[in-house]
Image: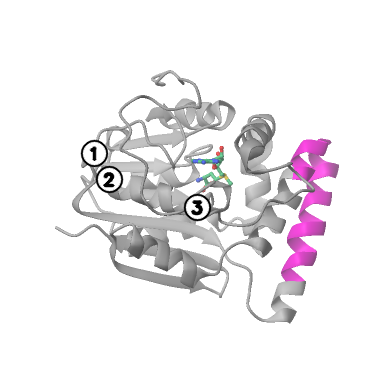
């Protein structure tokens, strides 16, 4: 498997200097799940490693089976097309990368990155893409080499949006495009309550019953709690601009499926 070795906290030594801006976590510490910022990464890596076998199944439950179609449309809207060289941050089991292969034309055009070897192994086995073990906040990759950078449903798992976005900016070529997909809690309280009932209670319960696994149940409860606690889209857009991106846009399909798109200046 073409994985780069992890060193220390999961990075290689070709990092850019730390950005001057203060850290911007996507949400406050959720003490019900982990004790503090310093242990969040380890908590997430263990959780995703353990639940990787069930991920695709539960994701289909959550998205009512539309996840594949939706990801492809969102990537197309963000400007992904044939021949582009892509980095998919938080590749997971490869649900975004699969659609990127279809749109760019070849697995060789797509590189996946993720800190969870359990998740990423599934992407590599299924898709044959190159894979890099690491986190979005410290990309172990040389600058200005990708035409397109995506990150699907992992914004809430970052420890510092400012740092991650400046890394995304660094590895994109001039003119390169960014697409960040995320779930955003509906602003209206009725929609929010309905979704909470479904995502925080029903999906974790169904997951527990059908997979028999308590850790999968925990993952999907955590999933909703991070959605509710996450920064508002305006703050995410400000952070993208602060990192140097231009043409920063946010579109929320059904007020729920958020797409952040942006470009690096030529
Ligand atoms: C909900 S999954 C999303 C997978 C895939 N992108 C998709 O659309 O289904 C979130 C992924 O983010 C990864 N992740 C967690 N923390 C991360 C970080 N700091 N940087 C990059 N990826 C991270 C997890 O290991 C996990 O594979």
Q: Which residue is disc 2 drawn over?
A: 170
Estimate how packed mark 2 is, as few (under 14), some (14 to 19) or many (20 or more) residues with alpha carbons within 10 Å.
many
Quadrant location of residue 144? top left
Contact between labelled residues 2 and 1, with CB atoms less than 8 Å apart: yes
Q: Kindly tell me whether residue 78 is visible in this rendering.
A: no
- Gap in Å between the C-alphas at discs 3 and 2? 29 Å
Q: Kindly tell me whether residue 148 is visible in this rendering.
A: yes
Q: Secondary structure at mark 1?
A: loop
Q: Secondary structure at mark 2?
A: helix
Q: Would you say 243 lies left or right of 259 here? A: left
Q: Is residue 92 above or below residue 156?
A: above
Mark linked to residue 143: 1
Q: Quadrant of ligand 1?
A: top right
Counting residues from the start of the chain, the first of labels 3 and 1 encountered is: 3
Estimate how packed mark 3 is, as few (under 14), some (14 to 19) or many (20 or more) residues with alpha carbons within 10 Å.
some
Contact between labelled residues 1 and 3, with CB atoms less than 8 Å apart: no
Q: Secondary structure at mark 3?
A: helix
110 or 225: nearer the viewer: 225
Q: Which residues are magenta?
A: 194-218
Residue at 50% x, 66% y: name it: 258
Contact between labelled residues 2 and 3, with CB atoms less than 8 Å apart: no
Taking the magenta stretch, the answer to whether it contains residue 214 is yes
Q: Which residue is disc 3 drawn over?
A: 68
């Amino acid at each position: 498997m073409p994985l780069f070795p992890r060193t220390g906290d999961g990075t290689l030594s070709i990092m850019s200097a730390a950005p001057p801006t203060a850290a911007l976590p996507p949400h406050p510490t959720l003490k019900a799940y982990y004790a503090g910022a310093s242990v969040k990464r380890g908590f997430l890596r263990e959780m995703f490693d353990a639940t990787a076998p069930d991920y695709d199944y539960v994701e289909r439950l959550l998205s009512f089976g539309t996840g594949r179609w939706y990801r492809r449309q969102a990537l197309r809207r963000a400007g992904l097309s044939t021949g582009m060289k892509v980095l998919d941050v938080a590749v997971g089991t490869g649900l975004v990368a699969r659609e990127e292969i279809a749109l760019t034309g070849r697995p060789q055009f797509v590189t996946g990155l993720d800190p969870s070897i359990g998740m990423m192994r599934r992407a590599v086995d299924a898709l044959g893409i190159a894979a890099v073990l690491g986190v979005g906040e410290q990309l172990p990759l040389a600058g200005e080499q990708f035409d397109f950078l995506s990150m699907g449903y992992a914004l809430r798992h970052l420890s510092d949006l400012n740092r991650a976005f400046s890394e995304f900016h660094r590895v994109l070529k001039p003119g390169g495009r960014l697409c960040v997909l995320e779930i955003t809690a509906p602003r209206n309280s009725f929609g929010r309550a309905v979704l909470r009932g479904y995502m925080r209670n029903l999906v974790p319960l169904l997951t527990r019953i059908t997979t028999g696994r308590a850790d999968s149940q925990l993952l999907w409860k955590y999933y909703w709690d991070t959605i509710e606690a996450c920064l508002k889209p305006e703050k995410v857009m400000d952070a993208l601009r602060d990192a140097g991106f231009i043409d920063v846009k946010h579109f929320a399909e059904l007020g729920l499926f958020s797409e952040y798109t942006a470009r690096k200046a030529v």
